[in-house]
Image (tube, rainbow, N blue to C red):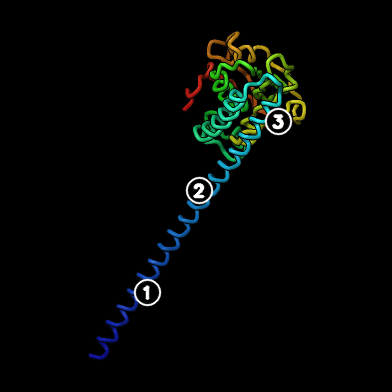
Amino acid sequence: MHFALSQGTSIVAKRYVMHSTAFAKSSATLLRGLVLVAACLFLADSARADDAKSIAGFRKAIIALGPDIDPAEAELVSVTAHTTARRLQKEWQVAPFALYQNFLIHIGKRQKGFCFDWAYGIGGALKELRLKTLVLHWGASHPGTRLEHNCIVVTARGQPFREGYLIDGWRAAGRLLWWPVKKDEYSWDEDPTETAWLQDHGPSKGSRTAQPRKTSAPGDGGAVVDTHAPAQPAAGSLE
């Protein structure tokens, strides 16, 4: 009788230990999940805080381009550029590093995210603003080579291209970068055909009615792909 009770007690004890261990493991998994969620929320809040600061700074910089700049247009350009970059970052499932995103596109794991994709996406949203005191331009660095890079440039009306601010969504993988064209590490020239598209004076040479564009993003190891850039995207058309 005593042996039976001891055996039963042992079985109960083993079951208790097993349940306790399982509970501990599930609790640890839950805790790790909660920590991960908290970290993601913290990073999202940090990104939003950084964007808010960047939006305010870019607005101020645009207004300083000239005495005739409409502050409301400067606000629109800054907010639209930043929010469009974040939207495309999410839609295109952009990797944390631009060059890795290029690699994923080349192997078929992603569809968009080259520098010219960003320029078309952000430029398409900005051109829909129908700006009166500001002018949009297309910047090209090392055009036609494996180092080619594209961006949007905003200037005051009548202001030279090199006096404006570049708008680049590619380099920081969706976190918008902006600063004076003449202070950038890249040497920029204006692409008149793409600028005409931005200013509604002509079709983009990357449009679906044009020939396929043979291009590569900067630093992608020289891999060249034949592709069509999006046809004159309108604001919200990429959502």
User: Who is closer to the viewer here, 235 or 170?
Assistant: 235
Mark 1 to mark 2: distance in Å? 36 Å
Mark in the foreground, 1 or 2: 2
Q: Which residue was labeled with disc 1?
A: 17
Q: Is residue 193 above or below residue 183?
A: above
Mark 3 to mark 1: distance in Å? 62 Å
Q: Secondary structure at mark 2?
A: helix
**Extreme-bottom residue of the structure:** 2
Q: Position of residue 147 (x, y in %)?
A: 71, 26
**Extreme-top residue of the structure:** 201
Mark in the foreground, 3 or 1: 3
Q: To which quarter of the image does residue 188 belong? A: top right
Mark 2 to mark 3: distance in Å? 28 Å
Residue at point 57%, 38% (across, down): 95
Q: Is residue 50 visible?
A: yes
Q: Secondary structure at mark 1?
A: helix
Q: Which residue was labeled with disc 3?
A: 179
User: Who is closer to the viewer here, 235 or 174?
Assistant: 235
Residue type beneath disc 3: Trp
User: Who is closer to the viewer here, 208 or 154?
Assistant: 154
Q: Secondary structure at mark 3?
A: strand
Residue type beneath disc 1: Val
Q: Earlier in the sequence, mark 2 or mark 3?
A: 2
Q: Is residue 88 above or below residue 209?
A: below
Residues marked 2 and 3 touching at CB (< 8 Å): no
Residue type beneath disc 2: Leu
Q: Which residue was labeled with disc 2?
A: 41
- Label 1 crowd (10 A; few <14 / some 14-19 / many >=20): few
Q: Position of residue 219 (x, y in %)?
A: 69, 32
Residue at point 53%, 14% (across, down): 208
